[in-house]
Amino acid sequence: MKRDPLGKLALGLATGTAFGAFLQRGGASDYDLIVNQLLLRDSAIARIMSTAAAAGSIGTHALRAAGATELDVKPFQVRSVILGGAAFGAGMAILGYCPGTTLAAVGEGRRDAMFGLLGMVAGALAFIRVYPHIKEAVEATDLGKVTLPSATKTSPWPWVAGLAGLVAAPALVIAIGRALPRRRPC
């Protein structure tokens, strides 16, 4: 088993803690906010997570371009994505938190999140027991280590720019709308 250096683990802990603090500060650990996102009544969580994805994408590819990191692309297993997405979605709909926001809510002392954390651990242990029995079926749909840039034979930067643009567009439209002079009705 490969062991990571202590500095790398410390950096992971620090960035994970910072991410959790940003989630908490942004309100992403608020049960009502998450439920309203799931009910399509509020898009704050989608904005927080898409901003994190865009920032992470920019940072990852900038570090990769500088030679400071390498990508470790996981194989795209269609059945894994479908089953994992269904389990993730069901858990989030039942609990009202995703794994990251569960930990942020546990940090706030929320009891419901503490029970959710126990459920996540139990689910992970159950998966470890079941996986050897479903491994062959799951891996039968393995499409390899594919990314959008590798599938389209393009640089990652247009994809990063597109993601960043999609995230920034709503805020830009709102800012422009506020900057335009208002007409008074006749």
Image (cartoon, rainbow, N blue to C red):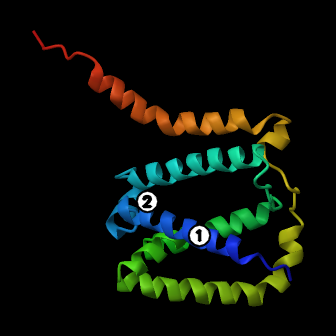
Residue at the spot of label 1: 88
Quadrant of image for the N terminus: bottom right
Q: Which residue is drawn at 84% across and 85% down?
A: 133
Q: Which residue is drawn at 12% across and 13% down?
A: 185
Picture disc at residue 38: 2
* 114 relative position to 33: left or right: right
Question: Residue 103 or 91: which is nearer the viewer?
Answer: 103
Q: Which residue is drawn at 70% across and 32% down?
A: 158
Please determine whether, in this image, residue 176 is positioned above or below residue 122. above
Mark 1 or mark 2: which comes first in sequence? 2
Q: Which residue is drawn at 42% across and 81% down?
A: 106
Please determine whether, in this image, residue 50 is positioned above or below residue 34. above
Residue farthest along the left direction in this orientation: 186
Question: Residue 5 or 145: which is nearer the viewer?
Answer: 5
Residue farthest along the top direction in this orientation: 186
Picture disc at residue 130: none
* Residue 58 image point, x, y percent: 63, 44
Please determine whether, in this image, residue 145 is positioned above or below residue 152. below
